Amino acid sequence: DVKVTQSSRYLVKRTGEKVFLECVQDMDHENMFWYRQDPGLGLRLIYFSYDVKMKEKGDIPEGYSVSREKKERFSLILESASTNQTSMYLCASSRTRTGGNYGYTFGSGTRLTVV
Amino acid sequence: GDSVTQMEGPVTLSEEAFLTINCTYTATGYPSLFWYVQYPGEGLQLLLKATKADDKGSNKGFEATYRKETTSFHLEKGSVQVSDSAVYFCALSLNTGGFKTIFGAGTRLFVKA
């Protein structure tokens, strides 16, 4: 069964810490995405990548960065965590840039709490 | 701009009731349409998809038909089960030029035994 694996289900971090969220996919997909999900706001795209070492800003990139050194791994970095970054973070991958005809495969999510 | 609008939830049904969750979209070009489901504490899973007008996507008893004339992709199921309780997201992806996938806000479904 194909998978997108996020390294942690729950994380608690302190304000100001540098936080790394890891995502690995085993489907040889070119495209990977990071979303955050908040009540009443739905899914918002933070960053995406359509190739190794490539990255593009999504709708809400402020306070975040990403790294894609290998095709299967896409990391989200919170440079200095703040309480307004408390959220559910979802990683996804797809076979096409738009997720067009194939759709996305999502990880199980990481619920991050910043205190 | 491009957008997806879903009916607001929560939707509460009794087991074996008929389910409809409405979804309409606005898009330039010819999008592919999707329904995703999110069970409590989990990420989203692709439920079904349709890539062109009049296509019907189906999976696990759920169906949705791509209606270009009404720009709709309503999700239906003839007889819901308690295990169908989840949040359902309608989404569109544009196949022309660059990245774009837009999700609706989600509709929470509760099914009572």
Image: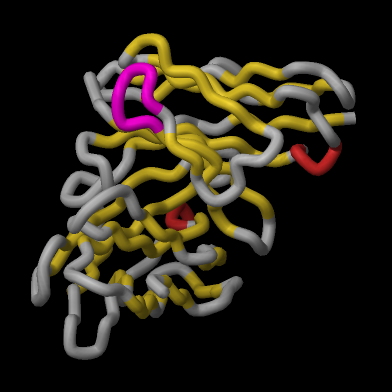
Horizontally, is A18 left or right of B52 in the view?
Answer: right
Nearer-the-camera pick, A9 or B51: B51
Examine the rendered structure and indicate whether residue B6 appears above or below residue A80.
below
Where residue B35 appears, as percent x and y from the top left, is 33, 59
Examine the rendered structure and indicate whether residue A98 appears above or below residue A85.
below
What is the basis of the colouring in this image?
Answer: secondary structure
Magenta highlight on residue B105: no
| Residue at 30 percent of width and 24 percent of height | A51
Query: Residue B109: in sight, yes or no?
Result: no
Quarter location, residue B64: bottom left
Q: Most prominent secondary structure in the magenta stretch?
A: loop
Where residue A27 appears, as percent x and y from the top left, is 24, 21
Q: Which residues are magenta?
A: A49-54
Horizontally, is B82 left or right of A72 in the view?
Answer: right
| Residue at 50 percent of width and 45 percent of height | A58
Q: Quadrant of the N terminus of chain B?
A: bottom left
Horizontally, is B97 left or right of A14 in the view?
Answer: left
Nearer-the-camera pick, A91 or A80: A80
